[in-house]
Image (cartoon, grey):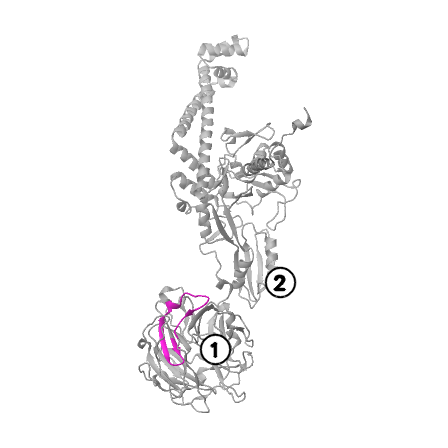
């Protein structure tokens, strides 16, 4: 034959397609994906089978790993030795397998990512639970196949008594598909299997009452159940894993102690990443991170700086490191040789069906053997009953075959029975042994009846499966390691910020910042003050607002728009810094400015937002009341909060409960008092009604509005431009109808200047005053005596040294040695879940 005649021309595209399909199917079926019945890939199955063949069981001495690897390579698995040894090592690692199948001795690596020692150094043997995987393998319970060179037989699947695929999970990348299955608790899975055996129609939701969530060998938390539920229902999902950490408080600083980490996380790399984040200042507040793990268990110690909040640091670590990560569930396994995506019920179903097949095949084998033994016993009993004649026939025979033929002819025995009689030992001729033959025969008959009943009675077969599962649970079941946290797995931004008290300042030119309240300290009345906010030329602090980091700040502009920000979204600055332009935080028009705010703790509380109101007051004395619910849906671009006339602007916004008294004060020193019931509830975009009539001098305007809840405990504080102020009893202000001109609240003179603000205060309050040049003073309200309504008051701050005017006034309190913020007009909420600030700190 010529050389060219041996060349076959084919289409390369078709050949590549055919060859690649063959290759991919080989990888899928023979290498990368586990069988749904025993949960093994071929390499794991061959390792365990090879170890059993070597007699390398749990009750025997360890053997060198190299010997096991050689056995597997030479007989069953013609691939690289590293793949076999790697699979062997993984089955012996307690942080990788929920239930180890191999008992390793020597260096098998560590959770720090250290690799195992070479196979010539390490030793191994089967774990007891690993032997359960091959229980009854010698009873023809599974199909066998020839090995790669057709010289030996190996099992196509293990007759496992353990639901290994669910219990130990699996991972692998095939061609065009992959699998990634988490580990589970053996006791929970067996309970679910028993529930399925009792009721094949049980739904997945019911099975999830038994198999609650994955149970990882490294412990930690399963954080949130939505991904777990999706994985069990569909076969795909995302399980969030979180490290188990506690905050330990010492006399000098706090420590974060991590005792369990998520499954699959390298501890050494985790600690390095924490140190890197701390060094790069991406996480503030960490001074050191050490690994103090020992034989007693894992212990990662993260030292928190004295001035840092350990809870906030821990939440940032969860967000930015592998202290919290996710396990992507993809339940792909081989079902009858084909890859399938399986839900929880299907995984349990196929295991139970496999156990049913194993029990049936084992029973058939045992029944066959029992019948064979019974057949022999029948012959032995006949021989023992006719022992003299049997001996005579055997002695007369020239050969064993003649003896067998003689017995068959005389007693109508089979060849098997006759051969057993010929091979019988003399000691079996004793009377005792004859009794034992009869007893054994009776026992065999009972066994045969029981085995036959299993084959015809499916209920009994199911009971056998259940009893064996319960036995496994009793022997190997243990407590769950991964604790379940039934909450959302998504981070709340508030988790990264301590709920500290803050002072929010907004300058006349629109710069905003938040500053810890602890930076401000009280001074005596009449003091000069300390240097406060640094502002640009001709700029000054116009608004100072008390709040806490987790509050929602509702900003109201002079044109009547409402915006929302969490306090932690406002940039932090020192007492001397100028802050950041508010236009960069809120989408405010260039000709608009924030004039008022509300602090609300929870805008999602329907009971609260439907029982409280937002009360507006404008420069021209217009007042409007709207249900808070109308402002409970934040939008980035804001919403119209009130319709403002062209020559007017919003100056005050209050939160009320519908039963407050209102006092409005104007620039010329007059105030009006009326009940809020006089103001009807209006829609969000309404204009409002007349609240106070102003003087017609063209210079008068409203400077403030307060809501009175407890007239007996509160007094009225007014402050003028030149630093004069006083307190008066609320009862000095008679109640009138809304819309009037009111009564005199301060004697306005050239020395006092026009009225700047009006506040409701108690003796426990402090007053923080900031002038237009940025000087801040804090004084105790109790130091300001109560005077008549029409007096001019006393000097609160000395402005003559600076030729200045008052810019802003804020009410705070010091209930302890630390400065604690107070609501401007007391907390009107009836529940601690809905703390609000009632006043706009002007």
Q: Taking 345 as reference, is 252 left or right?
A: right
Q: Quadrant of residue 530?
A: bottom right
Instruction: State the quadrant of the C terminus.
Output: bottom left
**Magenta span of residues:** 616-643
> Is residue 768 located in the magenta-colored stretch of the structure?
no
In this view, the residue farthest toward the bottom is 750
Q: Nearer the viewer, residue 86 or 508?
A: 508
Q: Residue at x 49, y 30 (%)?
A: 141
Q: Could you tell me residue 14's position as x and y percent?
A: 58, 36
Q: Which residue is mark 1?
A: 543
Q: SS at mark 1?
A: strand
Of the residues tagged 1 and 2, which is closer to the observer?
Answer: 1
Q: Quadrant of the N terminus?
A: top right
15 and 558: which is toward the camera: 15
Q: CA distance from mark 1 to mark 2?
A: 37 Å
Instruction: Name the residue tied to disc 2.
Output: 279
569 vs 289, left or right, is: left
User: How far across and down, in percent of the image, does residue 726 sit?
Assistant: 42, 86
Q: Mark 1: give few (<14), some (14-19) or many (20+) Cα within 10 Å.
A: many
Residue drawn at x 59%, y 59% is 274
Q: Picture coordinates of residue 496 (x, y %)? A: 51, 63
Front one among 512 and 433: 512
Q: Residues within 10 Å of mark 2 (few under 14, many from 20)?
A: some
In the image, which disc is placed on residue 380?
none
- Vertical order, 495 against 427 (above or below): below
Q: Nearer the viewer, residue 211 or 248?
A: 211
User: Are the residues tagged 1 and 2 within 8 Å (C-beta)?
Assistant: no
* Of pointers 1 and 2, the one earlier in the residue sequence: 2
């Amino acid at each position: 034959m010529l050389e060219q005649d041996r060349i076959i021309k084919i289409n390369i595209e078709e050949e590549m397609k055919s060859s690649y399909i063959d290759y991919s199917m080989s990888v899928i079926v023979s290498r990368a994906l586990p069988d749904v019945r025993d949960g093994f890939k071929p390499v794991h199955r061959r390792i365990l089978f090879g170890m059993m063949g070597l007699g390398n069981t749990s009750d025997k001495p360890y053997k060198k790993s190299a010997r096991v690897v050689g056995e597997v390579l030479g007989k069953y698995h013609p691939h690289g030795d590293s793949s076999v040894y790697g699979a062997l090592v993984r089955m012996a690692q307690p942080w990788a397998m929920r239930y180890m199948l191999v008992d390793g001795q020597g260096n098998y690596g560590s959770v720090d990512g250290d690799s195992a020692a070479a196979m010539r150094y390490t030793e191994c043997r089967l774990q007891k639970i690993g032997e359960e995987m091959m229980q009854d393998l010698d009873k023809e319970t599974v199909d066998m196949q020839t090995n790669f060179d057709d010289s030996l037989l190996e099992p196509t699947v293990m007759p496992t008594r353990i639901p290994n695929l669910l219990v130990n999970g699996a991972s692998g990348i095939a061609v065009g598909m992959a699998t990634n299955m988490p580990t589970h608790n053996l006791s929970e899975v067996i309970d679910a299997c028993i529930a399925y055996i009792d009721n094949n129609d049980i739904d997945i939701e019911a099975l999830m009452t038994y198999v609650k969530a994955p149970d990882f060998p490294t412990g930690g938390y399963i954080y949130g159940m939505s991904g777990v539920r999706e994985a069990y229902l569909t076969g795909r999902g995302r399980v969030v894993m979180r490290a188990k950490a506690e905050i330990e408080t010492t006399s000098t600083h706090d420590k974060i102690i991590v005792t369990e980490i998520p499954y699959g996380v390298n501890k050494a790399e985790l600690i390095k990443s924490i140190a890197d984040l701390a060094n790069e200042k991406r996480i503030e507040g960490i001074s050191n991170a050490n690994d103090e793990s020992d034989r007693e268990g894992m212990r990662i110690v993260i030292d928190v700086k004295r001035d840092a909040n350990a809870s906030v640091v821990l939440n940032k670590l969860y967000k930015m490191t592998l202290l919290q990560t996710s396990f992507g569930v993809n339940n792909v396994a081989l079902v009858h040789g084909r890859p399938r995506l399986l839900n929880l019920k299907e995984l349990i179903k196929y295991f139970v069906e496999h156990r049913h097949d194993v029990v049936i095949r084992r029973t058939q084998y045992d029944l066959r053997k029992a019948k064979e033994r019974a057949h022999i016993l029948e012959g032995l009993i006949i021989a023992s009953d006719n022992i003299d004649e049997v001996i005579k026939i055997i002695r007369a025979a020239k050969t064993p075959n003649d003896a067998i033929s003689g017995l068959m002819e005389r007693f109508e025995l089979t060849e098997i029975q006759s051969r057993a009689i010929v091979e019988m030992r003399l000691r079996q001729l004793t009377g005792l042994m004859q009794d034992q033959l009869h007893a054994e025969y009776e026992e065999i008959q009972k066994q045969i009846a029981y085995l036959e009943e299993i084959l015809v009675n499916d209920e009994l077969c199911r009971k056998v499966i259940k009893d064996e599962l319960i036995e496994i649970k009793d022997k190997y079941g243990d407590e769950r390691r991964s604790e379940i946290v039934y909450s959302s797995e998504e981070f709340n931004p508030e988790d990264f910020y301590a709920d500290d008290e803050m002072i929010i300042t907004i300058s006349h030119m629109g710069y905003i910042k938040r500053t810890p309240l602890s930076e401000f300290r009280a001074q005596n009345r009449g003091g000069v003050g300390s240097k406060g906010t640094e502002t640009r030329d001709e700029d000054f602090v116009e608004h100072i607002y008390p709040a806490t980091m987790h509050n929602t700040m509702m900003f109201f502009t002079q044109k009547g728009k409402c915006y929302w920000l969490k306090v932690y979204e406002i940039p932090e600055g020192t007492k001397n810094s100028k802050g950041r332009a508010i236009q960069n935080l809120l989408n405010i028009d260039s000709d608009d400015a924030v004039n008022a705010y509300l602090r609300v703790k929870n805008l999602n509380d329907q009971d609260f937002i439907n029982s409280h109101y937002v009360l507006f007051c404008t420069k021209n004395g217009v007042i409007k009341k709207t249900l808070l619910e109308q402002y409970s849906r934040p939008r980035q671009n804001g919403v119209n909060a009130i319709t403002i006339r062209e020559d007017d602007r919003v100056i005050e916004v209050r939160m009320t409960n519908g039963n407050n008294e209102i006092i409005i004060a104007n620039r010329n020193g007059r105030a009006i008092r009326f009940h809020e019931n006089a103001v009807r509830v209006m829609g969000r975009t309404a204009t409002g009604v007349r609240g106070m009539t102003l003087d017609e001098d063209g210079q008068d305007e409203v400077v403030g509005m307060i809501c009175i809840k407890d007239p007996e405990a509160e007094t009225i504080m007014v402050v003028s431009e030149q630093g004069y102020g006083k307190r008066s009893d609320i009862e000095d202000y008679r109640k009138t109808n809304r819309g009037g001109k009111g009564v005199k609240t301060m004697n306005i003179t050239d020395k006092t200047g026009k009225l700047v603000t009006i506040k409701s205060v108690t003796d426990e309050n402090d007053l923080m005053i900031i002038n237009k040049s940025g000087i801040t003073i804090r004084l105790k309200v109790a130091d300001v005596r109560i005077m008549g309504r029409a007096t001019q008051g006393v000097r609160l701050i000395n402005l003559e040294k600076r030729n200045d005017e008052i810019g802003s006034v804020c009410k705070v309190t010091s209930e302890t040695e630390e400065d604690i913020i107070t609501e401007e007009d007391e907390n009107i909420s009836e529940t601690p879940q809905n703390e609000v600030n009632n006043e706009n700190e002007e």
